Amino acid sequence: MLHGIKIKKAARMVYHEGFHNLYRGYLPPLCQKTTSLALMFGVYDTFQREILLLDPSLNRHIVNAVSAFGAGTVEAVLTPFERVQTLMQDKAYHGHFRNTLHAFRFLWPFGIAEYYRGLVPILIRNGPSNILFFELRGEVKAHLPMPRSSTWYTEFYGDFVSGACIGAFISTLCYPLNVVKTQMQSVVGEKEYTRFLQAAHYVYEERNRSWRRIFRGFHLNYTRALVSWGVINASYEVLRKFVY
């Protein structure tokens, strides 16, 4: 994503760097993802409930959109985890950081703004992607070929497939934003690429003004999203039945 190289070349780089670097930087996304999902679904349900208490007559789609956008905005508070993940997974910093805590401490002298470098593309990504996810998952599930008899595993299947399809779609749609975000977060202390449009222009020029190169590697991204968002959506619905 950062360097825009082909998969075979990336695989060779990983091979030469060693297997121990393959999972380098796994702790920040682990912390970020679990907390982010809790915020995403929890804040969405809370906003939805509170808005309907204020005015039950509001259009369902408007309520869903506002709740989803609000949840995505709240999620952006976890930007520092994405920031540190990018640094730890960048080859340029492999010998620089001992662990996640060391990376967090390294950024401290540069100020709080350094932790939130890349916030703009994250905000642009989170709100609209949440709206699409919460609006489409029910629609997609409703159009799936489902057995007449509803059982727990048919429901799980429907939730998994709908979550997988929407997750892969959103992941692909937002891929250029993630490329720009990664570019912004790959440097420390420099004023270069601190602005979203500046970083976007650099990426566009660096990839020879080719959208194909900007999207290079997206199929790995949506393959991961297919599995992860399928599991996330199905698990959410299962847990929701127990909680509510």
Image (spheres, rainbow, N blue to C red):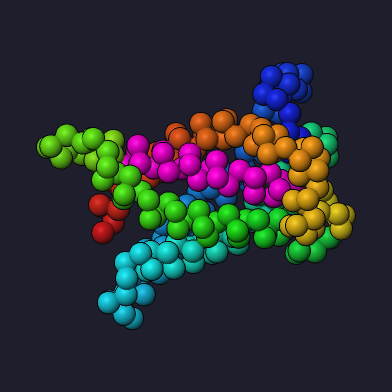
Is residue 159 visible from the viewing direction of this image?
yes
Residue 168 on the magenta span: yes
* Image location of residue 45, percent across then percent down: 37, 63
Is 67 on the left-hand or right-hand side of 97?
left
* Image location of residue 222, percent across then percent down: 52, 35
- Secondary structure mostly seen in the magenta stretch: helix
In this rendering, the answer to whether 230 lies above or below 63 is above
Residue drawn at x 43%, y 51% as measured from the top left? 133
In this rendering, the answer to whether 103 lies above or below 217 is below
Q: In which quarter of the image is the N terminus?
A: top right
Is residue 106 visible from the viewing direction of this image?
no
* Image location of residue 218, percent across then percent down: 60, 34
Q: Nearer the viewer, residue 229 or 140?
A: 140
Is 95 on the left-hand or right-hand side of 25?
right
Residue 140 on the magenta span: no
Q: Quadrant of the C terminus?
A: bottom left
Residue drawn at x 33%, y 44% as measured from the top left? 140
Task: Please report the bounds of the magenta region as a residue range.
Answer: 159-183
